[in-house]
Image (cartoon, rainbow, N blue to C red):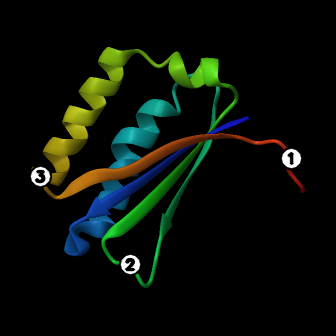
Amino acid sequence: MVIEWLKFRVTPELREKFVQKDDEIWTATLSQYPGFLSKEVWISPDQLDEVITIIHWESMEAWKSVPQDVLEATDARFNQAMGAGNQRIDEAARYQVRKRHP
């Protein structure tokens, strides 16, 4: 399993809208592709301008099989829904799950 980890900075007043639109736009799109397993969205009670998304992929190949044009179109739809300058990716990382306990 591969983890896509993204940390966003969001206008605090729009954090709930970000979570909603992320689900409606990004999660709905990515979940159509084989290898997408699940997604978590984390918010902090202390950092109101922060949202972290954790996307679980079956493999790196599955993650990277999402066409670039689909990613770009989805990003454009999301940015239009959120409005310019209201969010940005602050950090991005990828991880491999080495051990998992039930």
Earlier-in-chain disc, 2 versus 1: 2
Tell which residue pokes out farthest to the bottom in this image.
46
Find disc 2 in the rendering and name its residue: 47
In the image, what residue type sits under mark 2? Gln
Label 3 crowding class (10 Å Cα cut-off): few <14, some 14-19, many 20+?
few
Q: Mark 3 vs mark 1: give the one in front.
A: 1
Left or right of 55, for residue 9? left
SS at badge 2: loop
Find disc 1 in the rendering and name its residue: 99
Q: Residue at the spot x=68%, y=25% of the render?
A: 59
The label on residue 83 is 3
Label 1 crowding class (10 Å Cα cut-off): few <14, some 14-19, many 20+?
few
The quadrant of the picture occupied by the N terminus is: top right
The label on residue 5 is none
Label 2 and label 1: CA atoms lie apart by: 29 Å
Q: Is residue 48 above or below residue 28?
A: below
Q: Residue at the spot x=14%, y=43% of the render?
A: 80
Q: Residue at the spot x=26%, y=52% of the render?
A: 88
Earlier-in-chain disc, 3 versus 2: 2
- Residue 81 point in image, percent of width and height: 18, 48
The quadrant of the picture occupied by the C terminus is: bottom right
In the image, what residue type sits under mark 3? Gly
